[in-house]
Amino acid sequence: MKNCRAILKKLLENKEFLKILNDTADALGAGALILDVNGNILANIGHGETYSESEADSFPLNIKGEQAGYVKGSKKAQAIVSIIAYMLAAEYDKRDLIDEVSNRYKEINLFYDFTEKILDCNNLNDIVLMTLSLIKNFIKTDTVSIMLRNEETSWIDVITAYDYGEKTVKKSIAAYNGESIAEYVMMSGNAEIINDLSLDGWTAPDGGKSGSMMCSPLKVRDKVIGAICIATEKIAEFTSSDLKLFATLSHNVAVFVENVSLYKDLKEVFLSTVYTLAETIEMRDNYTGNHTKRVMEYSYAIGDALGMKNDELEILRLSAILHDIGKIGIRDSVLLKPSKLTDEEFALMKKHPVLGEEILKKIKGLEYVVPGVKHHHERHDGKGYPDGLKGDEIELNAKIISVADTFDAMTSDRPYRKGMDSKAALDELVRCSGTQFDEKIVNAFIKAYPHIDI
């Protein structure tokens, strides 16, 4: 539960919001006191009415079942209560979105690091050590164990990495005796949390019977090949969010263990996570449904037509997925406006490529997508934004995304206009070749477009 009392206090520090409350109170001729749950005055609103504390009505300010404070005043003050309650709810939902984005960032960092570092792992010892090193940044753990079914011996091969000040690896074997949580997880195929081993009667992979543990099956193509467990010496109180993140990571470990297209599979998991993040941002605007997917497909098709290599296409695809991530910093009144933007509003909208750069440059390993995100609104003639780059000063990925993004914008319906048909939009791209767009990019798109299946 978020601290709604802190949200109320922060909201009342906003001078513009206080002015709205005061103007409303004065218009109603209603004074009011806004207090925290302990009765401390946070704000004195309006000047049109006086009363004693005993004469005032008290109106609670509640969000999601939690009381943030209350308002004292006459019945006229109920309008003020409604305004505050609405803004509290909006701020609460805004923080929900921020939390969701933050969680996605954590996942992206974890999966990207996993993808990069797993390529240096040559054996299971390396993978358990690397998994322990990475996962402990997000989930409290002292050990990581990978248990694999040995079909030939009917035993479980166990490889455990410990982190008690110095990382060590231990190999062992265990019989199927039905006493370990790993066996149960392998049989059920479902991840489990055991927050107190001493109460639940299970044992950790090293035989310990105290502390906490999470265990997830290792599945490859719906076949359970083993399990992965993390454990702590002391009770850790693992959460369902921890389990979700751990279970997702477990899938990637399983792919590595089975050695089935490891790099490709992990890269796809990473891209899927980034795409989910982009979709989360896109969901704010009901009129741009699947915009990210289409721009990604158009961009990939252009890159393929230009003869880009697989690793270059992957960078292009990721840049296209994230090209509008900066729009998370654009307020709804501008982003969701159903009519043409004013000059001031358009100036604000033009900041989203730079906001995208600021977000992505903070994520380790994503520096290579920044140019495509930041410069996808530059023009071939130098009249674009944010930096006024022209010609070869603009990175290839940015040029490609510019064509893909513009084509999708022209062919998509908006509340204030109907989208063009594809032929008219392609003709417009040709007309603007050499000025707004690089001619070779437009030609590649025209060549690829008949073969794009969206």
Image (tube, grey):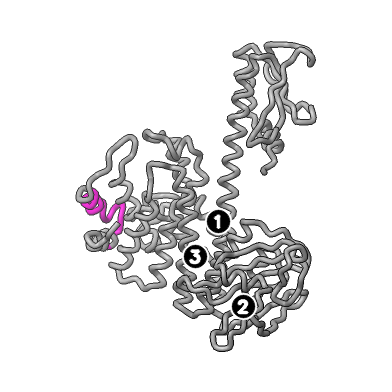
**Residue 228 in magenta stretch:** no
Quadrant for the C terminus in the image: bottom left
The secondary element bearing badge 3 is classed as helix
Q: Nearer the viewer, mark 3 or mark 2?
A: 2
Q: Name which of mark 3 and mark 1 comes first in the sequence.
A: 1
Picture residue at 73% right of the left edge, 11% below the top: 50
Residue 139, quarter of picture: bottom right
Picture residue at 39% right of the left edge, 34% below the top: 338
Q: Is residue 86 left or right of residue 370?
A: right
Q: Is residue 418 left or right of residue 55?
A: left
How far apart marks 1 and 2 lie (CA) works out to 28 Å
Vertical comparison of 232 with 120: above or below: above
The secondary element bearing badge 1 is classed as helix
Which residue is identified by label 1? 104
Furthest-bottom residue in view?
Answer: 152
Between 220 and 91, the one nearer to me in the picture: 220
Q: Is residue 395 left or right of residue 38?
A: left
Vertical comparison of 52 with 126: above or below: above
Which residue is identified by label 2? 147
Between 213 and 2, the one nearer to me in the picture: 213
**Residue 255 in the image, given as x and y percentages of width and height:** 50, 75
Which residue is identified by label 3? 270
Instruction: Point out the stretch of residues depicted in magenta.
Output: 425-440
Q: Which amino acid, by three-letter code, is at mark 1?
A: Arg
Q: Which amino acid, by three-letter code, is at mark 3?
A: Phe
Q: Nearer the viewer, mark 1 or mark 2?
A: 2
**Residue 439 in magenta stretch:** yes
Quadrant for the N terminus in the image: top right
Cβ–Cβ under 8 Å for marks 3 and 1? no
